[in-house]
Image: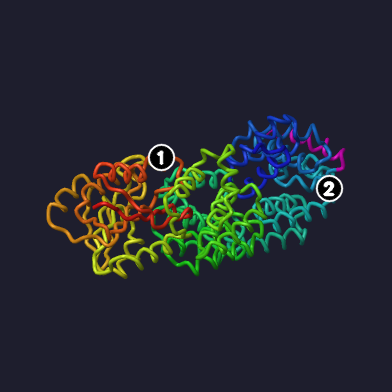
Amino acid sequence: MELTVSQALKKGIAAHKAGMVQEADRYYTAVLKAQPRHPEANHNLGILAVGIGKLQEALPFLKTALEVNPDKEQFWISYIDALTKLNRLEEATGVIAKAKSKGISAENFHKVSVKLAEANTSKPSDGVVDKSQLKFLGSLKLAQAIKLAKNKAKNGANEEAEKIYREILKKFPKNKKAINGIKVLTKNSFVKKSKLQKLDQVQRQMLINFHEKGQFKLLLTSATNLLLEFPSSSELYNFIGAANKGLGELESSIIAYNKAVALKPDYADAYYNRGIALEQKGQLKEAINSYKKAIENRADYPKAFWNLSGTAEQITEAKNWIEKCLLVDPEYEQAKLTLCALDYYLGDKSGFKSLMNSSYKDHPYVRSFAWVFNLPTLPELHFHRWALFDRIVEISKKDRPFYEFGVWRGESFKYLIKTFKTGYGFDTFEGLPEAWHNESAGTYSSDGNIPKIKGGEFIVGKFEDTLPGFFEEPRPKASIINLDADLYSSTICALNYAASVIDQHTILIFDEFLINENWELDEYRALNEFCEKNKYEYEVIAVSFFSKQVAVKIQGI
């Protein structure tokens, strides 16, 4: 659905506030395609450019915004600040004069002030801060200059405040307010620095880029190094949590998120991210509480409502959270589509039929739903991996071991070993052996660290190298085979060599079977080729549209 100009602007502002620069840029650019001189979109694109250090590129946007709406005070301030950062001080001074003619107070030009003060050194007249000495103040009196310095200190711009005080003291050496102002700044400098300093946009964008590219080691190193400069940055701890989560270090991730919310108790994003890490660790109750804390601090947080639907135990519970998600954001695609699937399970097929007759017909979600709904028997529906595991464990043969292909950090293995006591895990522990869709080779590496789990035997190496030798010897039949190798090539290799431990009682769980953009080319393809080659059929027992899992039993063995 194409967005209106106002909708695109609103989404751009929301993304901008969340620090998602690329997404904000996309929405603002969409606005300008429709309305090239839209003042807010031009201004906000200019601010984005300033934030990532592209000052020269920012000026045309900021200037256009000002030309279209010269009555907007912030447009003047932003344009003057950009000119100042480019050291175009004379031009900035001229724009300030125009701003004053519009009734804009000179006290608003915080960032331009100090540079202009440093650039001019002639003497003022007694009792008044002269334009030639502190041109940024225009004709402000001494009291107004003191007030400006106080405002800067109050907003955390301590260095700028101190410079103004010292400029004042050069001409009025006994001014008590300036003397006391410097004393207060000196006394509180360390505390204020640690509390008020924040990442600049260039630093923030660097960390965002590492995260978006899946470069979690670089993200962790960079964020940790920045902590030396910003020791009390809740934002940095949030990045550190994200890096550790991406590396599979869930305990470390949760610790970092805990630190982020301790420093900033209203940090909704950190609560949300902590919820994901807790859920991945199987701590459902704690994850639910964390998602709810995110919503407490940001009532219009659709992602948190959506993730709560993935912690549900019943269809009606999941539907309730999805409906709340859609109240906040009626266009939340995952929620809109999944709601139709839940209604189908509840007996109302109209929504799904509408999807099949719409442009969504080829959407990976809808293709996944269609495959499930066309099965001979509608399988059980679960909402998180641990619920599906619990159900499959319940109906499995518990006197047998389980096999897992793709172990990574061993969270699933730890969960299953509690029931089966014996398990065999196969992994290189060096990540994906080849690129997989948007994931590069080496993703999901545990840096060669093999989990130490009582009852677990781990066979290290590529499947094609280790499985032939392992399965040459007689092996016990499998209770469960958990296939978490993602790739078609790895999955078909595992199935072919593990055929000797599969019988009519073995349950296969595929971890990335559905929902992904090209899901039919991965584990789905491997399962169907395996069965076709051996003239088997399979029965689908359970699915999860949220965790993308599918559990099957092989028939005809």
Residue toward you, 396 or 495: 396
Is residue 101 covered in magenta? yes
Label 2–label 1 contact, CB within 8 A: no
Q: Position of residue 394 (x, y in %)?
A: 36, 68
Which residue has dot 2 on it?
A: 140
Q: Is residue 452 above or below residue 225?
A: below
Residue at image position (72%, 60%) is: 179
Q: CA distance from mark 2 to mark 1?
A: 62 Å
Q: Is residue 387 visible?
A: yes
Q: Position of residue 253 (x, y in %)?
A: 44, 60
Residue toward you, 68 or 309: 309
Q: Is residue 133 visible?
A: no
> What label sits on residue 547 in the rendered view?
none
| Badge 1 amino acid | His
Q: Between label 2 and label 1, give the one nearer the viewer.
A: 1
Quarter of the rendering containing residue 249: bottom left
The secondary structure type at the circle numbered 1 is: loop
Residue at image position (82%, 42%) is: 138
Which residue has dot 1 on it?
A: 437
Quarter of the rendering containing residue 346: bottom right
Residues in magenta, as a range: 88-103
Give the overall secondary structure of the magenta segment: helix
Q: Position of residue 63 (x, y in %)?
A: 74, 32
| Badge 2 amino acid | Leu
